[in-house]
Amino acid sequence: RRRVARGRPTAAMPGAPDEAMMARLRNVLLTGRAGGAATDAVPGGLALLFDCDGVLADTERDGHRVSFNKVFEERGLGYSWDVDEYGRLCEVGGGKERMTFYMNKNKCWPEDCTNPTTEALVKGLPVDETRLALVKSCHARKTELFQELIGSGVVPLRPGILPLVDEAIAAGAPHAVCSTSNEAAVRTLVQTLMGEERYASFEFFCGDCVPAKKPAPDVYNLAASTMKLPKDKCVVIEDSGIGCKAAKAAGMAFLFFHPNEKGGRGV
């Protein structure tokens, strides 16, 4: 049985996430149903901060990975990422950083990038202009392909997400998406899969909006400061180790929402 990670809830303020509240949130995510009244799982004093990929929808495996591989094929790079490989790469925050890490580790830069002016990296990205231009252009094309894929509706929301968002809206609970992914791609996903009314209810903190990506806590700190949220009233919903580390470093309670070995889901 896979170990379930969870942030330590705090009850420093009325309405802060305690064990009972966390259990109700887990129940909605697992069953796709609310346990009672509209505000049963999401009291108005609580704020929900969602990661995007792997939490709102299984976009990592069936969206981003597929789009990356299409770019690699278009560019004739000679490799592709299978599900297991991509799962490991998801511990590197950011798509441009992920490509850089992979090509450095496997020494598989294309021919025009094999003699860089420097091997140095800044925030996970190449300093060399040719290598940096490559990962930026590949990532831009990947984003185009990803948005087309999401717009087609082939990647559904994960069960439990829509009922939880509806409860948050009904309760007047602030909610946001906090993701290392490109903001346009995240917005397309939420708008396409959740509809205009739910889309309009979200705040978005995405991509390069902060200096350091997860596992640094910057994106969650930015959400809390911008939305004027007490951190002990925030619950982060994540599906990755780096995301959980970011939430913990920000001093927020979190739920680890993950697929299990039998293809189901766990929290």
Image (cartoon, rainbow, N blue to C red):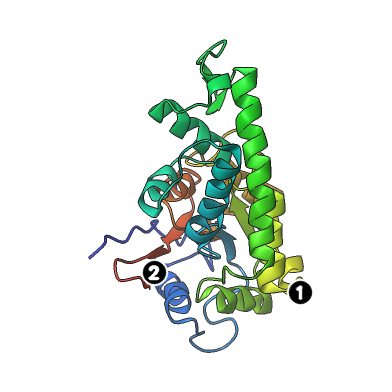
Q: What residue is shown with label 2?
A: 19
What's the mark number on residue 39? none
User: Is 159 left or right of 186, judged from the image as shown?
Assistant: left
In the rendered image, the vertical position of residue 219 relative to residue 7, given as above or below? above
Mark closer to the observer (1, 2):
1
x then y, percent, for residue 169: 67, 75
Residue visible at 53% across and 67% down in the picture: 14
Q: Quadrant of the N terminus?
A: bottom left
In the rendered image, the vertical position of residue 50 relative to residue 123, given as above or below? below
In the rendered image, the vertical position of residue 197 relative to residue 186, given as above or below? below
| Dot 2 amino acid type | Glu
Mark 1 surroundings within 10 Å by alpha-carbon count, few (fewer than 14), some (14 through 19), many (20 or more): few
Residue visible at 70% across and 69% down in the picture: 192
Q: Quadrant of the C terminus?
A: bottom left
Q: Is residue 19 visible?
A: yes
Q: What residue is shown with label 1?
A: 197
x then y, percent, for residue 158: 51, 71
Residue visible at 43% across and 69% down in the picture: 22
Mark 2 surroundings within 10 Å by alpha-carbon count, few (fewer than 14), some (14 through 19), many (20 or more): few
In the rendered image, the vertical position of residue 17 relative to residue 31, given as above or below? above
